[in-house]
Image (cartoon, rainbow, N blue to C red):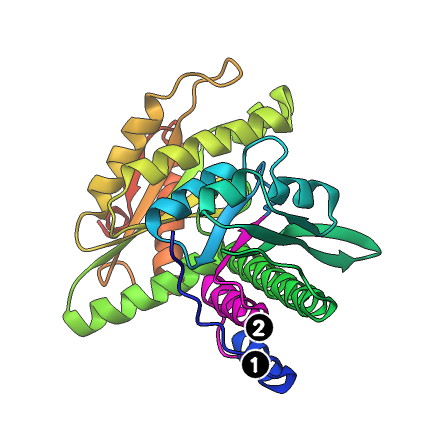
Amino acid sequence: MTHESGTESHSPTTILAEVAGALARTDDLDAGLGQLLTVAGTGVGAPVGAVYLQDPDRAGLQLAVTIGLDPAHRAAVEDAVGVEGDTVGVVARDRVAGFATSGAFVAAAGVVALSARPLLIARGGVELPLGVLALAWDEAHVESSDEAALLDAIAGLCAIAIDRNRLAAMVAERSEWFERMAHTDPLTGLANQRTFARVLELELARAGRQGSEVSVAIFDVDDFAAMNAEQGHQTGDDILRSVAAVLAESVRLVDTVARYGGDEFVVVAPGAAGALVAQRVLSSIGALAPVGGHAVTVSAGVARFPTDGTTADDLVSAADAALVRARASGGGKMEIAAVEAG
């Protein structure tokens, strides 16, 4: 196999500038590793190279980027890492640099000599393995001390790039989690009261501009306090999660369902179908299997904008008053706020 060399001699200053640029100019890990690998290959006259990643959540090494390999040889190199005793795997396991003129990688890549270095980062006094940097020559080669020093340095920079990328991903995940928790009820996974209030204000503003309707439906689990006291909080939590699941499945895509507090839930339903949505919820919850030996039912109160109120507070108050009437009628029922005016 003939490899493209592109291996002009680079001065230390040029190499330093190139590796600094590779780290500073991209936040794409593969692109950054590819640039570092190219600089390393050019610096030591190696036309073939690869970077493997070691994921703490996955077994083995995963081939990330390569230079000087066509698709067929890349696939062969990717398979070679699993071969017992291969230099790349040994370097990853022992965390010590290795040099070889035979083995699975050498055969798979069609090269003559291979130099591999572990990618390591220290945190809290503990050395963490992140992968392996491998460079190869297609002719006999003896690694000089200068080449070894350069590859050690670039291996360290590859480790920094990988670690930085993973830390950034972790920060993004945590930020997303905190954002989600700020708007989500932790027990049921539904929107929380804060999110409900914001959505209702937005829907009321839109309905006011468009001259349309919005319904607010409040649901209360019948006899929840008694069931909670008799069966315990775990059963109570199971009931709330069951009701929340039915609510989420019963509403329309345009509706917003939230836990309003305690054993109460609320739905914001744009348009004129709020009562129909509420009745569908009641029917679906009524079909639930008993929890802790108790049948699960809910009562509901529905109020409509602008008929029953023009502000969020007015609508919630009207829906709550209708809910009180529904509970008084024996549970498992729905009342419409406008009935009061009759």
Residue 189 place in picture, x, y as percent: 47, 43
Residue 143 place in picture, x, y as percent: 67, 61
Determine the secondary structure under disc 2: helix
Of residues 60 and 166, the one nearer the viewer is: 60
**Magenta-span inclusion, residue 41:** yes
Residue bearing the label numbered 2: 43
Depicted 105 relative to depicted 283: above or below: below
**Quadrant position of residue 154:** bottom right
Of residues 314 and 253, the one nearer the viewer is: 253
Depicted 333 relative to depicted 27: above or below: above
Q: Amino acid at mark 2?
A: Gly
Q: Which residues are magenta?
A: 24-53
Q: Which mark is residue 10?
A: 1
The residue lying furthest to the top in this view is 293
Of residues 62 and 134, the one nearer the viewer is: 134
Q: Amino acid at mark 1?
A: His
